[in-house]
Image (spheres, rainbow, N blue to C red):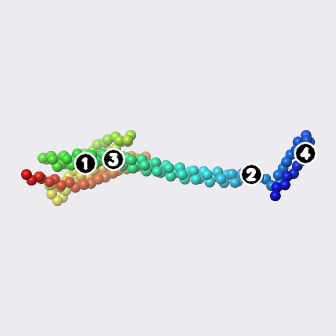
Amino acid sequence: MAKKVRMMSKTGIKICHLSSERGFTLIEVMFAVSILTLSTMVIQEGFLRSATLFGRYANTLIANAWMEQKLWEVKEGLVYAPVPDLGGQSGSFQGSKRSFEWSLDTGYARQGRDLYTLNFTVSWHEGNRLVSATRSIVLAKCSLLT
């Protein structure tokens, strides 16, 4: 139970003191601020990780779409060319404000001269890491019967 003590100062102003103080202590305020700070840091870390993953997956989608287009062109060239262009190719392309490097190795499969292997790799830098997407396929050249 709070008791009020009334006093008169020398100037005649009434001063009221509470015997049981109300409010927060400094330790309680510091504890609350530290809990809020830690929870904010955890939430911020989650947002930063999700933004990083979103960027990585967006770049992977760009690389995969470009890789599909390039593989289609190479497949068409191998199937319809009288003499296939085998060997390695490499280059770079720009997509979404990022530079991508690619390499393609084309060769005969072990089973025969109408089977080809295509090994395609696209790589790019995500911060300090080198990220790459790889696709390997075997292509069969079929002759049409007339």
Q: Mark 3 falls on what kind of element?
A: helix
Nearest to N terminus: mark 3 or mark 4: 4
Q: Mark 4 falls on what kind of element?
A: strand
Visible residue check, residue 128: no
In terms of image quadrants, where is residue 1?
bottom right
Nearest to N terminus: mark 1 or mark 4: 4
- The amino acid sitting under disc 4 is Met
Q: Mark 1 falls on what kind of element?
A: helix
The image shows residue 84 at horizontal and vertical percentages of 16, 48
Q: Which numbered marker is on residue 8?
A: 4
* Residue underneath mark 2: 23
* Residue underneath mark 1: 71
Q: Residues within 10 Å of mark 2 (few under 14, many from 20)?
A: few
Nearest to N terminus: mark 2 or mark 3: 2
Q: Which numbered marker is on residue 63?
A: 3
In terms of image quadrants, where is residue 19?
bottom right
Q: Badges 1 and 2: C-beta atoms under 8 Å apart?
A: no
Question: Is residue 127 rendered to the left or right of residue 68?
Answer: right
**Inter-mark Cα distance, 2 to 3:** 59 Å
Nearest to N terminus: mark 2 or mark 4: 4
**Inter-mark Cα distance, 2 to 4:** 25 Å
- The amino acid sitting under disc 3 is Ala
Q: Nearer the viewer, mark 1 or mark 2?
A: 2
Q: Nearer the viewer, mark 3 or mark 4?
A: 4
Q: Residues within 10 Å of mark 4 (few under 14, many from 20)?
A: few
Q: Nearer the viewer, mark 1 or mark 4?
A: 4
- The amino acid sitting under disc 2 is Gly
Q: Which residue is drawn at 31% across and 42% down?
A: 92
Q: Mark 2 falls on what kind of element?
A: loop
Q: Which residue is drawn at 69% across and 51% down?
A: 29
